[in-house]
Image: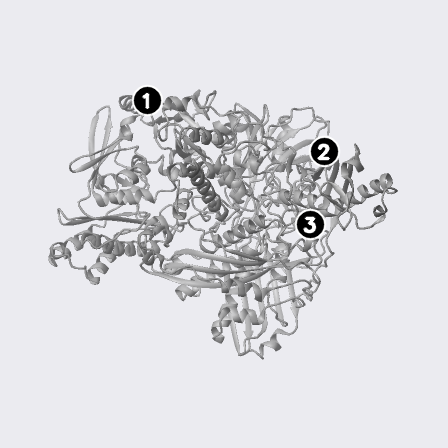
């Protein structure tokens, strides 16, 4: 095994071009577990800790440009207003120690369906900026996840930033686990209201081979909100609409039975989370919602 | 022992001295090893280090049940940095070890009987080299069908997990795949059932729990010039280890010198041998010190677990709430090797009635051999599974009678003088009803705090916690009660003793006591109370605790809640003998100076010999001068009897311990998530030798019970008998956010038969915690819930 | 490979480090600092918690090569670190107010603690002993590093804050009640001391 320590982004890209099998390591919270438990012996480890730009973020007009290695703790503490869904998701990641090291780039690189950030990114809307010595490109988040622990990166590419749409409305995120902290998602759900475009977006984690959106549920809710004039009249969403939305979110899930939970439970829980989050976000939109301490 | 001229390994424990003015029995003295532990200086077994040491690595079976066709180590042997590769063919002498039966192969030969069984060993200069070499060993298996439950184990054509059993239970069991069977018959349950106005039946399932001690199995074996081995390990019972290790190394016991290295928790999981023999074999083969440290994955295969169980119960009661009878069958899965299954069966059977008066019972407990992971000792030892079931039955009975569940229990609660189903009279306090009264009388924690707490409302206090799953939706409160009974010490006629070597001498004008025992300090605070007892008995301030090793007689195991009773008793006894010797010397020297020397009731207090009236006759320094007094003595509790194999009758137990819990939970009934809000405990501790430690034990035991109620379970695939979750990612233990406030109320009703009146405290709270939480969840949801842990699926109908 | 970094204020060099080794392994097996514990090596228990440039992290998940040139504080250096923080107005190296230069001058003093007698402890260490928060002690080093850092950030934590800050540190012995007591005790003592100044 070789340990590559590029001092700059350019050096990192050059190293990745030269050694496409090199495994990038930043927070180490995925890679080191695999090494410690003998699951993986990469030829090269490519350390990204020295590259400052990966740990920076910038709040623009429309987007937040989030460096791939910005630790979850920083997202929770500094980007609650701009990225409420991702801030909530960040707070559910493992433990404080892990949140101090891990970042969204790692979640995307590993592309596990259980990664906590994915549903929030899907719901908010995001593009992943990846780069290689050949140049850079933006991959829409909807096209990023290509299979179980697979993503759209080319072997010579590294994740540089994620451009996430700044919230223009309420966002929520929940994850179900069998412990009250430090737990891998049995399943997770994120919801973002986008009043500017009068749309909603969702994200489902750990309930399909990849993180997914519940697109039929979104389409249904978009239409129902439009039809009922809810965006304008700010009325309470009827239980029938909420139920239909929840059922469609459940139906979008395509989970498996595993040691963490049954497929049946996952589908059920996605529906419950969808219904609750619709209630919470809509109350926030109507200006009557309250947030609880600890919820970001 | 001077044979060993090697340098002493880094991390070798040394004397720890503590100076306290008021640190006798009954005081909340602080730990003598506390400073070492908070500075990181305390050396655990995994911290041991030796110049030139090698690293040992185990290759474990990837299948649960198979014949071993071949093992090819050639490639591993030629790897750079590898010093030895061993298989069963390299075993020098005995091939098996075991606590109760010697049925466990050091390295598998012929066949493997469970997933993760050791098959080969590597020693290399770096752990990574050892791992890579182990991966190069080729083992060919011919897989066999797996035995996984009672039906597959006792089928007429079942494959035998162990052929040709020659253990002392082989002759009386109904099937060779049954390790042991213990029936208990008292009264006439069928006849008594006719008096019952209501009858309830239940079938209960208890999952496989892991001790999940944090310090992994580890240690250092150093080959000695006399051909023996010096072994630094973390274990619960040095001498029992040595009896098993020496024959497998082909060495006499005195050539296996063991020193207790720092122990990172035990809870029963270190009662069996883990890496002791393996590291010693590698050290003796290579002539170099060998360190072995299991990682967490391997740790799940490196020790036995709590027996999972199926329990079938029937109880009847009259309209006025008196229990008429009980019938039960308890099936404990011992897994592939016996470990302590025999004793667990004895406990489950003899304590299956719970802390209740029931005169007519028909009880049967069996322990199985299967291809599941081996199970043995864990805190609560057979009584935990039974308590889970009988307490569910009590709630069912109360509900059917329309009675309050606590009043119903109190109406049937045992007390001093009650006769157990084994015929044994409970001959010391048994305040079962009072313990229940105390937990019930506590004020309730505030309800729906997320609504009432205003600004300070917090998702972290809701089911789901940080995961933000509920802001109060679907959340329902439930309250549940449970009480349990646990035996203390080793039962069924076992010759249970401990040994204490006490030295009293004068250093710089001050009397100093040194306590040397082989007792395992697993975290419980044994060393703290050893010093306290020496202070009380010898009237000194300064006490030195000598490291535990095999240079002193056996202390027995740190288990069964027995060490304060047993090693505490041994220290008390040896101190009394030291005191007699001191007084003898004093009488010789000064007897003629003062008539009170003839008084039989002289004490040692504050460094002086004093009369019971408090008059000082001489200082210990003046009596002893440069003479040291040293006593090493064994000490025993009252003898017990074996249980009759047909009727189960016999005075089998030394002492009983009781604890009661009230659980308050909030359940997100839609998502099936549980938050335990409060878990109050009341327990009789006989005498709190160290109140701070007593509370710590009760809170810790309570939390382990909480874990198995809602999250902890080793999941074994019933088709392959392979473990599916051997990691802390998927075997979850409670975090600080899962653990509620645990108010503790303890009684001190002395047991007249025990030193200072003590009662073993560590285990009882683990019993009643689980059923109390289950009862509370049932109360919140209205569901029957006959299996623990309760998974979200069970609460949401999504199994 | 070779790795140079600072541990408890002292420059350290580790040689022949295998590229897959963790910071935890280097501390324990190469630098003679086994205080950070190896309970799970997968970031699930927090027993190996150290401060890396001031931030609490699981040292089992930091690749040794990643600490080149960086500063690590382990439980072995905690007492000295806390003392230094006290001397600099309640803040330790770099974390809040102390200049990097000042921080670099800080160095842990050697301790003679075979018996533990006479060792100077940080407030959180003393509180863990006094409150009975130590049983087997295997989780203690990680908890101390995490709790000390929390009290540095948040001198008057609520119980919920304490629970959240320590939710990455598993303890199997205590049921956490005495650990909560210890952190409350350290916070109260810290507050009293602040008032007295």
User: Which quarter of the picture shows residue B390?
Assistant: bottom right
* Front-lying residue, B501 or C95: C95
How crowded is the residue under tag 3: few (<14 C-alpha within 10 Å), some, or many (20+)?
Answer: many
How crowded is the residue under tag 1: few (<14 C-alpha within 10 Å), some, or many (20+)?
Answer: some
Secondary structure under the numbered disc 3 in the rendered image: helix
Task: State the residue position of label 1.
Answer: A6
Q: Position of residue C83 (x, y in %)?
A: 46, 30
User: Residue B255: which disc?
Assistant: 2
Q: Position of residue A7 (x, y in %)?
A: 32, 21
Q: Nearer the viewer, mark 3 or mark 2?
A: 3
In which quadrant is the N terminus of chain A drawn?
top left
User: Position of B599 compared to A295: left or right?
Assistant: right
Classify B730 as above or below B327: above
User: Residue B566: which disc?
Assistant: 3
The chain under label 3 reads B
Q: Nearer the viewer, mark 3 or mark 1?
A: 3
Same subunit, labels 3 and 2: the answer reads yes
The chain under label 1 reads A
């Amino acid at each position: 095994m070789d340990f590559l320590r590029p001092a700059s982004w350019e050096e990192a890209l050059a190293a990745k071009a030269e050694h496409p099998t090199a495994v990038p390591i930043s927070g180490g919270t995925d890679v080191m577990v695999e090494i410690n438990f003998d699951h993986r012996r990469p030829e090269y480890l490519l350390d990204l800790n020295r590259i400052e730009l990966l740990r920076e973020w910038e709040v623009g007009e429309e987007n937040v440009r989030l460096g791939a290695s910005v630790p979850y703790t920083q997202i929770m503490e500094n980007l609650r207003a701009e990225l409420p869904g991702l801030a909530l998701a960040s707070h559910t990641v493992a433990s404080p120690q892990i949140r101090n090291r891990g970042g969204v780039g790692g979640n995307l690189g590993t592309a596990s369906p259980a990664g906590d950030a994915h549903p929030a990114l899907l719901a908010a809307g995001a593009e992943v900026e990846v780069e290689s010595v050949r140049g850079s490109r933006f991959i829409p988040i909807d096209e990023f996840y290509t299979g179980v622990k697979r993503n759209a990166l080319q072997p010579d590419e590294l994740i540089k930033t994620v451009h996430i749409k700044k919230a223009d409305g309420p966002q929520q995120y929940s994850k179900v686990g069998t412990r009250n902290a430090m737990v891998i998602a049995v399943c997770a759900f994120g919801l973002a209201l986008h009043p500017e475009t009068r749309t909603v977006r969702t994200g489902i984690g750990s309930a399909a081979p990849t993180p997914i959106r519940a697109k039929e549920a979104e389409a249904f809710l978009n239409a129902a909100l439009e039809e009922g004039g809810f965006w304008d009249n700010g009325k309470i969403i009827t239980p029938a609409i909420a139920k239909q939305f929840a059922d469609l979110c459940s139906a979008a899930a395509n989970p498996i039975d595993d040691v963490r939970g049954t497929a049946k439970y996952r589908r059920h829980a996605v529906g419950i989370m969808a219904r609750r989050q619709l209630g919470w976000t809509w109350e926030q939109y109507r200006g009557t919602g309250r947030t609880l301490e600890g919820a970001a | 022992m001077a044979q060993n001229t090697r340098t002493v390994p880094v991390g070798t424990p040394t004397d720890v001295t503590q100076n306290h003015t008021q640190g006798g029995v009954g005081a909340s003295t602080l730990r003598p090893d506390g400073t070492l532990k908070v500075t990181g200086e305390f050396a655990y077994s995994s911290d041991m280090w030796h110049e030139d040491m090698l690293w040992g690595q185990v290759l474990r079976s990837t299948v649960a049940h198979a014949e071993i066709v071949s093992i090819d180590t050639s490639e591993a042997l030629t790897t750079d940095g590898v010093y030895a590769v061993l298989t069963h063919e390299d075993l020098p002498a005995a091939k098996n070890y075991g606590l109760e039966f010697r049925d466990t192969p050091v390295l598998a030969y012929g066949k493997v009987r469970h997933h993760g069984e050791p098959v080969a060993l590597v020693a290399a200069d770096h752990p990574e080299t050892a791992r890579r070499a182990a991966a190069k060993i080729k083992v060919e298996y011919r897989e066999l069908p797996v035995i996984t439950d009672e039906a597959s184990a006792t089928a007429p054509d079942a494959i035998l997990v162990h052929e040709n059993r020659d253990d002392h239970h082989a002759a009386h069991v109904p099937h060779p795949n049954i390790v042991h069977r213990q029936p208990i018959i008292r009264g006439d349950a069928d006849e008594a059932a006719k008096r019952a106005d209501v009858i309830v039946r239940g079938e209960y399932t208890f999952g496989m729990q892991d001790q999940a001690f944090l310090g992994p199995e580890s240690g250092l074996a150093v080959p000695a010039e006399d051909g023996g081995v010096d072994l630094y390990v973390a274990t619960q019972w040095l001498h029992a280890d040595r009896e098993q290790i020496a024959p497998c190394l082909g060495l006499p016991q005195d050539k296996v010198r063991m020193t207790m290295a720092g122990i990172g928790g035990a809870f029963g999981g270190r009662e069996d041998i883990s890496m002791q023999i393996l590291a010693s074999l590698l050290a003796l083969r290579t002539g170099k010190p060998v360190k072995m440290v299991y990682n967490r994955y391997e740790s799940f295969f490196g020790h036995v677990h709590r027996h999972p169980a199926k329990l079938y119960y029937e109880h009847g009661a009259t309209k006025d709430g008196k229990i008429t009878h009980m019938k039960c069958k308890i099936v404990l899965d011992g897994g592939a090797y016996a470990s302590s299954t025999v004793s667990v069966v004895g406990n489950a059977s003899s304590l299956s009635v719970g802390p209740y008066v029931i005169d007519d019972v028909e009880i049967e407990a069996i322990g199985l051999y299967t291809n599941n992971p081996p199970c043995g000792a864990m805190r609560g030892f057979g009584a935990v599974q039974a308590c889970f079931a009988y307490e569910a039955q009590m709630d069912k009975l109360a509900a059917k009678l329309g009675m309050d569940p606590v009043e119903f229990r109190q109406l049937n609660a045992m007390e001093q003088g009650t006769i157990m189903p084994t015929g044994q009279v409970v001959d010391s306090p048994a305040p079962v009803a009072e313990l229940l009264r105390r937990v019930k009388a506590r004020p309730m924690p505030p309800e729906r705090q997320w609504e009432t707490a205003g600004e300070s409302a917090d998702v972290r206090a809701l089911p789901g916690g940080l995961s933000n799953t509920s802001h109060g939706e679907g959340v329902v409160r439930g309250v549940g009660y449970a009480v349990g009974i646990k035996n203390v010490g080793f039962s069924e006629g076992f010759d249970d003793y401990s040994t204490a070597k006490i030295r009293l001498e004068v250093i710089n004008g001050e009397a100093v006591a040194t306590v040397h025992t082989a007792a395992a300090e697993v975290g419980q605070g044994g060393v703290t109370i050893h010093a306290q007892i020496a202070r009380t008995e010898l009237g000194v301030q300064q006490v030195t605790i000598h490291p535990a090793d095999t240079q002193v007689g056996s202390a027995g195991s740190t288990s069964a809640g027995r060490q304060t009773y047993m090693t505490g008793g041994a220290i008390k006894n040896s101190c009394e003998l030291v005191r007699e010797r001191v007084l003898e010397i004093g009488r010789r020297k000064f007897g003629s100076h003062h008539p009170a020397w003839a008084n039989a009731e002289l004490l040692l207090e504050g460094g002086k010999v004093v009369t019971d009236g408090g008059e000082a006759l001489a200082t210990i320094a003046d009596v002893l001068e440069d003479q040291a007094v040293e006593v090493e003595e064994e000490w025993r509790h009252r003898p017990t009897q074996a249980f009759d194999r047909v009727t189960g009758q016999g005075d089998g137990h030394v002492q009983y311990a009781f604890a009661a819990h009230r659980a308050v939970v909030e359940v997100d009934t839609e998502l099936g998530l549980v938050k335990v809000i409060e878990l109050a405990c009341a327990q009789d501790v006989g005498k709190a030798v160290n109140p701070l430690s007593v509370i710590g034990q009760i809170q810790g035991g309570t939390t382990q019970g909480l874990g198995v109620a809602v999250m902890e379970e080793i999941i074994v695939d019933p088709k392959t008998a392979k473990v599916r979750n051997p990691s802390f990612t998927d075997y979850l233990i409670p975090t600080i956010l899962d653990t509620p406030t645990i108010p503790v109320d303890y009684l001190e009703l002395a047991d007249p038969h025990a030193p200072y009146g003590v009662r073993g405290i560590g285990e009882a709270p683990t019993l009643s915690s689980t059923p109390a939480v289950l009862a509370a969840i049932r109360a919140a949801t209205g569901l029957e819930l006959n299996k623990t842990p309760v998974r979200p699926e069970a609460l949401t109908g999504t199994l | 490979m070779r790795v140079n970094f600072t541990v408890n204020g002292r420059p350290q060099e580790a040689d022949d480090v295998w590229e897959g080794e963790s910071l935890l392994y280097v501390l324990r097996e190469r630098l003679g600092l086994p205080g950070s514990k190896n309970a799970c090596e997968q970031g699930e228990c927090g027993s190996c918690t150290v401060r890396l440039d001031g931030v609490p992290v699981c040292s089992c998940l930091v690749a040794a090569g990643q600490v080149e040139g960086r500063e690590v504080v382990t439980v072995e250096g905690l007492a000295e670190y806390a003392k230094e923080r006290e001397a600099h107005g309640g803040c330790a190296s770099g974390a809040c107010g102390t200049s990097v230069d000042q921080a670099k001058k800080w160095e842990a003093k050697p301790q003679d603690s075979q018996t533990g007698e006479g060792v100077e402890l940080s407030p959180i260490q003393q509180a863990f002993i006094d409150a009975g928060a130590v049983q087997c002690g295997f989780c203690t080093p990680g908890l101390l590093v995490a709790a000390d850092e929390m009290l540095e950030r948040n001198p008057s934590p609520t119980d919920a804050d304490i629970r959240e800050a320590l939710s990455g540190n598993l303890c199997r012995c205590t049921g956490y009640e005495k650990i909560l007591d210890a952190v409350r005790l350290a916070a109260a003592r810290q507050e009293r001391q602040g008032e007295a100044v």
